[in-house]
Image: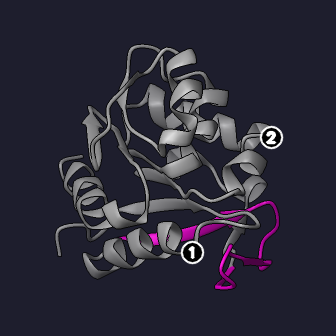
Amino acid sequence: MRLKNKKVIALVSPDFEDLELWYPVLRLQEEGAAVHLVGEKANETYIGKYGVPAVSDYAFSDIQASDYDAILVPGGWAPDKLRRYPEVLDMVRYMHEHKKPIGQICHAGWVLISAKILDGVNVTSTPGIRDDMENAGAVWHNKPVVVDGHIISSRRPPDLPPYAKAFADVLAEQ
């Protein structure tokens, strides 16, 4: 198991895109990673856009980013809420400063925009936020997955297989 002893934060908030949370979480767990769901409150049930629940393991304030090897930001409408929490932005900035893997898919780019870490970074996202990504200084590509160092980005649910693989590959190299 190539991700044994790796710890990953998976952010969760209401209206996350169900597949964009669960597919990478399960894929990383299959490879041995410990993935913790982290939301505003611990032991809170968050409901995805299509009704799939996710119970948070920890609250944002319960964890230290330095205890983790990577972070996943799901899409859906959750990123618009997640980017409003200073703790979330601090986690993302910490991961960026320490070159730890940051996974973002679909609308998750909004969190990276608010963290102000995209200047000059090659990314993709749902085409609906392309202008937002470019206005934040990112170089946007219409590809299923884009890896720029430690930042792994993807467009939407049909791109989940190459996205989850790319994220696991980058994490395994850490």
Q: How many marks?
A: 2
Task: Report the span colored magenta.
Answer: 33-54
Question: Can I make out residue 25 in this image?
Answer: yes
Provide the secondary structure element on which disc 2 rests.
Answer: loop
CA gap, disc 1 to disc 2? Answer: 21 Å
Q: Position of residue 123 (x, y in %)?
A: 37, 32
Q: In the image, what residue type sits under mark 1?
A: Asp
Question: SS class of the residue under badge 1?
Answer: helix
Q: Is residue 36 left or right of residue 2?
A: right
Check whether the beta carbons of the residues at disc 1 and disc 2 lie within 8 A of each other: no
Q: Residue furthest bottom?
A: 52
Instruction: Please give left or right for residue 155 compared with residue 172 in the image.
Output: right
Q: Position of residue 32 (x, y in %)?
A: 29, 76
Q: Mark 1 vs mark 2: give the one in front.
A: 1
Can you give x and y, in whole percent of width and height, for residue 62 in the image? 74, 59
The residue under the point 44% across, 20% down is: 138
Label 1 sits on residue: 18
Queried whether the magenta region covers residue 23, the answer comes back as no
The image quarter containing residue 74 is bottom right
In the image, is residue 141 above or below residue 102?
above
Quadrant into which the N terminus falls? bottom left
Q: Is residue 41 magenta?
A: yes
| Location of mark 2 (residue) | 84
Q: Residues within 10 Å of mark 2 (few under 14, many from 20)?
A: few
- Residue 166 placed where, x, y %? 23, 54
Q: Can the viewer see residue 68? A: no
Local packing at callout 1 (Cα closer than 10 Å; few below 14, some 14-19, many 20+) is many
Residue shown at 56%/47% (left/top)?
108
Of the pair 23 and 31, the residue shown nearer to us:
23
Which residue lies at the image location 43% right of the left edge and 72% below the top edge? 25
Choose the circle earlier in sequence order: 1 or 2: 1
